[in-house]
Amino acid sequence: MKILLHACCGPCASAALPVLAGKGDEVAMFYSNSNIDTEEEFERRLESARRLAAADGVEIVADVYDHADWLEKVAKGFENEPEKGARCRRCWEYSLRRTAEYAASRGFDAFSTSLTTSPHKPSPAVFEAGEKAGAGRFLAVDFKKNGGFLVSTRRSAELALYRQKYCGCEFSRRALRGGRDGG
Ligand code: SF4
């Protein structure tokens, strides 16, 4: 199968790529993350994702960065939601919808997401967002299973990938001040 992997960041994708490659799938990465609060941070995470793609010999495509659109369509009215709440579910669906559209336009059989690598992202809720976004083309894989998060920390150290301290949007920076760590 030809699969488009939505890459939320290099570290999470570093655990997802070997799982998909191990199943014999042909994989490309799609970096779509308009949820990130600044372009500087978007580029910093993209650079890490590109480094991973080069190491694993995988093609990577970067989506446009449009945080204003994300604020309007995802966050408006949901600014005070806690992490893992309604804003986050809308956020995952937003990026996965863009991934699904790109996958369909380029002849991919399915798409998936590295979001499930993170212990901060409940996989069943991410799957729900993927299914809403993907009209039957979403491949639900729980990349945190079988020590996936440990794989991501090991590979991130080996490849010197940048590991962010907050999820992405400005609202998750508030949570960082409250002690939250990681994407
Ligand atoms: S906390 Fe993370 S998942 Fe939730 S809305 Fe912000 S960027 Fe998206």
Image: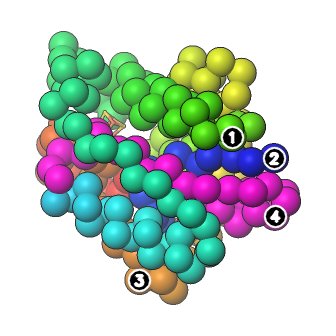
Check disc 4 and give the amino acid type.
Gly
Percent coordinates x, y for residue 151 in the rendering: 61, 70
Find the distance from the CA under tag 2 to the CA under tag 3. Answer: 30 Å
Check disc 3 and give the amino acid type.
Ala
Compared across the picture, whether 32 is left or right of 128 comes to: left
CB of mark 4 near ligand 1 (< 8 Å): no
At label 3, counting other C-alpha atoms closer than 10 Å, the crowd grade (few under 14, some 14-19, many 20 or more) is few
Instruction: Residue under label 2, please give it.
Output: 1
- Colour mapping used in the image: rainbow
| Range shown magenta | 13-39
Indicate which disc, 1 or 4, sits on the residue closer to the N terminus.
4
Residue 40, relative to residue 77: is it above or below? Answer: below
Instruction: Residue under label 4, please give it.
Output: 22
Find out whether the residues at labels 3 and 4 contact each other: C-beta distance under 8 Å. no
CB of mark 3 near ligand 1 (< 8 Å): no
Find the distance from the CA under tag 2 to the CA under tag 4. Answer: 12 Å
**SS of the residue under disc 3:** loop
Compared across the picture, whether 104 is left or right of 84 comes to: right
